[in-house]
Amino acid sequence: MASRNHDSASGLLKLSNELLRDILDHIESDPDKLVNLDRRNYLSQESFKPPPLPAPNQAQDIGSFRLTCKRFSELGAIHQFSRVTTRFSKKGFLRLQNISSSPHLAKNVKKFSYMVPYFYVEGRERVQQILPALQASLGTVDVRQIVKKINEQKEIVTSREDERVLTNALAAFTSLQHAQLLRVLDQETAALQAYIRQHDDANQLVELNWTPACSHSAKTLGAALLAARSPCTRFSSPMLSPQSAMVLATHPPKTTRALAERLTCLELHFDDGQDLDNKMRELSSLFKVIFTAAKNMQAVHIGFPSHRPLSLKLEEIFHNVRFDKLLAFGIQAWRLDADEIIALARRHRDRLKGLRLRDVLLKEGSMWKDVLAFLREDMFRLDWVSLRRIGYAKHFDEQWAAAGAEVPDDPPGGASESDDESDWDPHANADQDDGSLDSLGDDSSIESENELSDDDNGPEEEGMDFPMISPDTPSSVPWCNCGRNAFPENPEALNDNGMFVSNPQRKIWEKWVVRRCPEHSER
């Protein structure tokens, strides 16, 4: 029996690294197999959508594999540490410090996700006063954990522990490709947030606020990327506050341009409904510096809350810049004239393969049929177009007026039914809590190298992952030559009434633009 086990082990050792990597892929899919930039679900999955939960034994299996020998340890580390997720917490920074202090582990990190909670910005000293009421209202949630987090946040910010650890880590991550800033909401914070909403007097004692948390974290993360001279070329955040973007303005323009020159992908959703137009207008000059310098940009997405579309001109953000290497472009929640969309598309007609116009509303005097006709006839390289929840500004405003002053989380009438995962909405469930958030992320032991494995890339990455993969995206659906149900060439036959676009209608329009068969193409 011993001889047979020895023969099996020696046989495994004779396999090539490529075959062993394939074996590991069956145990745990390599998270670094990034989707091509020109695929439809790039602009919603890799940077913004949470990956599927890993099987409970995946990390344990990879860990056992790594214990076999030095060669297996190095191969397994590629899987365990290609993604590293860190929370803004003492435990999270300690874990990050241990990973980054091991060069043979740090060199494998290609994606870094920074999970940041709401900041307790007021009433820290008086939070004890609401504990009796909170304990009764929060049920089984231990309010002592809330107090612990408040004190911990204050200590981290005061000591600048986050800045120090982030800078050292990003300097050690010599293969880093993608950094993302995400918002996380655990059980205790969600319960406290609900309590505060129901009790006006609680706001005088403690306040939960995302803006200072986002601004502080964007500042420290940005400074760390610059100080570390990181090779990172992709940045994404699904819950960015406009104020946090102003952090870049504090750096010399030369430094900002140097950072922008390396960018190949930038995916941002701004999450602030108050006076958003003016806040974004203040960022206009900063966007001009970044986009003018971003000569290597291949994918860009700028979005806003679906229920508060931006009213700025498109070029107040993009400044007539032409990205020579652009493959995929996306915007979300914007009031525009048809000519603005056509002008931007025309600048990129030679290379653009994907165009997302989600929640875009046309102003009075514009028609979607004119936009679609241009895309069909002039965008000869276009593989896919996403038009989910497009419409007309007048109809949108009428719906809000009918709904009353209270702004719901979803667009009037609710979101259209989901027809593909690539149209996932980063705002729809942004604050949902996963009870396992705390239990699966920062609890990794730091006692041994094996226990440093990045097994929190599942539920902890609540905020989402952003490249375009799906076997049935338009670029992979074969062209149909059945000759039946052919689309009319005339855009007048699209039945665009200039008032409202239904979900079934926009699906047909998407196929019409890229000349897909309405019967046999899946999208």
Image (spheres, helix red, strand yellow):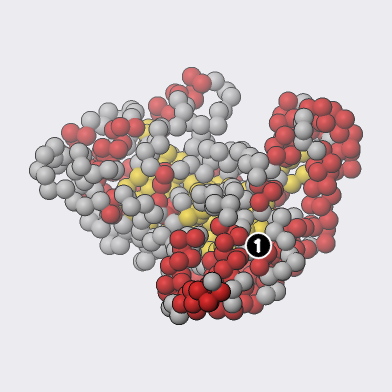
In screen coordinates, is 370 left or right of 298?
Answer: left
Provide the residue designation for mark 1.
221
Where is residue 457 drawn, in percent x and y?
58, 56
Q: Residue drawn at (38%, 48%), measured in percent from left and top?
A: 356
Callout 1 crowding tier (Cα within 10 Å): few <14, some 14–19, many ≥20: many
Where is residue 488 drawn, in percent x and y?
14, 38
Q: Residue furthest front?
A: 1
Quarter of the image with the N terminus in it: bottom right
Where is residue 471 drawn, in percent x and y?
33, 52
Can the viewer see residue 1 in this picture? yes
Where is residue 196 drawn, in percent x and y?
75, 31
Kindly indicate the quadrant of the structure image that contains residue 394.
top left
Q: Is residue 500 above or below residue 246?
A: above
Which residue occupies the foreground of this view, 399 or 385? 385
**Three-letter code, disc 1:** Leu
Quarter of the image with the C terminus in it: top left
Q: Is residue 494 above or below residue 232?
A: above
Which residue occupies the foreground of this view, 409 or 481? 481
Q: Is residue 415 above or below residue 219?
A: above
Q: Residue drawn at (62%, 77%), measured in percent from left and top?
A: 104
Q: Residue furthest left?
A: 483
Q: Residue drawn at (58%, 41%), measured in percent from left and top?
A: 430
Can the viewer see residue 464 in this picture? no
